[in-house]
Image (cartoon, rainbow, N blue to C red):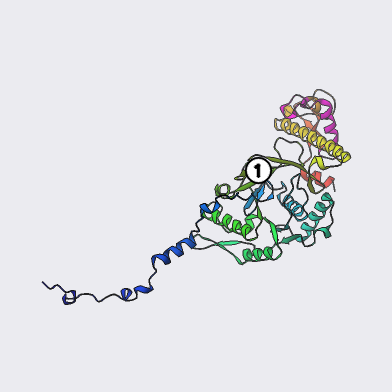
Amino acid sequence: MPRDLASVRNFAPVPDWWQHRGMLPTAEDEWREASRMLPLIDVAAWEGLEPPEREWALPGWIPYRQATYLTGPGSAGKSLVTQQLATCTALGLPFLGVEPRKCNAMYLSCEDDADELHRRQAAICKALGVSMSDLAGKLHLVSLAGNLDTLLCSVDDAGRVVPTPRFESIAAVARQLDIRFLGLDNVAHLSAANENYRSEVAGFVGLLNSLAIRIDGSVLFLGHPNKAGDSFSGSTAWENQVRSRLFMQVPDTSTDRDVRVLSRQKSNYAQNGEELAFRWHQWAFIRDDDLPPDQRTEVAAVALANGDNAVFLACLRQRTSEGEGRLVGPSPGPNYAPAQFEGMAQAKGLKRDRLRAAMERLFAIGVVEAYTYRNTSKGRDVTVLREVPSGDVDQRQH
């Protein structure tokens, strides 16, 4: 039996890769590439060093180098509160009692045009006691309303989230203008990621985190809940991916529809559950404690009246829904509305005098009216109290 391999019939020639084996990656090359992809932290290098303090755009609420998600139902005022926060940040003024880190700020809206931003900014400046010129070079507003090219990312065939030229332009402008606080309004216009796919949500949030790191600041992006009672829309990945999530609403328990509450629903860096209470007042947001004493008294009186009005209407709607035999009247008698409402659960403990005052206010502004109809079973006309249809109210007030 032959012992040298060269004499073996059909023995394959030496492969090309063996002749060029010097060009193949070595173990050192593989390590260098792997360490680039997986940057290791030398924990021993921290020996004797104090960890750096956490940095915040808004202490306890919006961390630095992270994207924070602000959600809430439509008309709660998320856009207004974000533009006001950007203004306070640009000037270093307290935001609803909390001191922000002063830095250049940008608010980008995909839904409101420049005129609406102007109107809103005028109200904000008036509430804060500053002028537009005070904001020169510090606050930057952007309107992309009506623009079809607003997406910050696309999703490729492999399901990877890919930044768009719009994203890169925002990053470049923010760096050039030294923007450290960036408000993005809102996610429906900015993300092509499917909100129900965890990997795509994670990719989009990761993209915004990378933007916060690139500008060495904070990104606050806005979104809407899917339906009433929800805090956000889509996959729970929204909750899991962000380090900080805020929620803004009109409290269900409040009869004062101008009251707002901003709550910290998730924070990896602060205690959950803390709230800021404030109110809508003359097209801006303000704390009751920040109002002058005379305005505070006036606002409190208006809030009380509005609350009583809402209670009265709740009682009226309940009785109306129960049918003809439960209708109430506007004049003193057996079915007098304030007397009938006094003991109802919807009255929330209000006594007859306050309910009567509420009825008179609602008459004055055309929200309720006396209505006479023919009661065939009694064979006579009956006058009852009813709520004026909303369209009729609008016509009477113009």
Q: Pick the quarter of the image with the N terminus.
A: bottom left
Q: Is residue 129 visible?
A: yes
Any magenta on residue 44?
A: no
Q: At which x and y percent is residue 353?
A: 84, 27
In depth, the one of 18 and 264 nearer the eye is: 18
Query: Residue lying farthest front?
Result: 48
Quadrant in which residue 264 is drawn: top right
Q: Residue at x 31, y 73 (%)?
A: 18
Q: Is residue 262 toward the left or the right of residue 207 in the image?
A: right
In the rendered image, residue 356 lying in the magenta stretch gets the answer yes
Residue 16 horizontal/vertical position (percent)? 31, 76
Q: Is residue 369 visible?
A: no
Depth order, front residue of 65/126: 65
- Tell me which residue sits at (75%, 31%) in the image: 315
Count neighbours of disc 1 (C-alpha within 10 A) and say few if under 14, some if 14 to 19, many if 20 or more.
many
- The rendered magenta stretch, by its main secondary structure, is classed as helix
Q: Which residue is mark 1?
A: 264
Task: Say above or below: 76 vs 145.
Answer: above
222, above or below 332, in the image: below
Q: Please state the horizontal and vertical placement of residue 225, each as a whole percent of the image.
A: 63, 47
Q: How many marks?
A: 1
* Residue that extends furthest to the right in the rendered view of this protein: 294
Q: Amino acid at mark 1?
A: Arg
| Secondary structure of residue under mark 1 | strand
Residue 292, picture quadrant:
top right
Name the residue furthest left: 1
In-front residue for pair 316/142: 142
Residue range highlighted in magenta: 340-367
